[in-house]
Amino acid sequence: MKDYLVRFWKDEEGLETIEILLILSVLIIIAVMFKDKITTWAEGLLEKVDKELKLGE
C-alpha cells in the first residue's frame, strides 16, 4: 500500500491539465472583474477602425 501511495504521489501525469485549468480560471476571473473596461476598450477600437474605413472610401 505504501508503494502505491508513493508512486501515486510522484506521478505527474495529468498535471498539465490542472495547470491549464487553473490558468484559464484566473483569466476568466480577471475578465469578469474588468469586463466594463475591456468592453469600453474594444468599443473604442471598433469605432476607430470604422472611422478609418469610412475615410478610405
Image: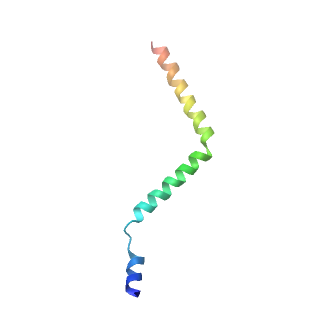
Q: Is residue 24 left or right of residue 32?
A: left
Residue sitting at 57 percent across and 29 percent down?
44
Q: Nearer the viewer, residue 41 or 28?
A: 28
- x and y, in percent, of residue 17 in the image: 41, 60
Where does the C terminus fall, quadrant-wise?
top left
Q: Quadrant of the N terminus?
A: bottom left
Q: Is residue 24 above or below residue 34?
A: below
Q: Residue at coordinates 53% horizontally, 24% vertically from top-left?
A: 48
Q: Residue at 38% across / 74% down in the picture? A: 11
Q: Nearer the viewer, residue 54 or 14?
A: 14
Question: Depth check: 21 or 53 in front?
Answer: 21
Colouring scheme applied when the structure was drawn: rainbow
Vertical placement of residue 46 versus 17, above or below = above
* Number of numbered discs overlaid on the protein picture: 0
Residue 16 rendering spot, x and y as whole percentages = 40, 62
Give the residue at the far top of this rendering.
57
Q: Residue furthest front?
A: 1
Residue located at (45% from left, 61% from top): 19
| Residue 31, image x, y percentages | 56, 46
Q: Is residue 29 left or right of residue 9?
A: right
Single out the residue that lies furthest toward the bottom.
2
Residue 8's x, y, as percent?
A: 40, 77
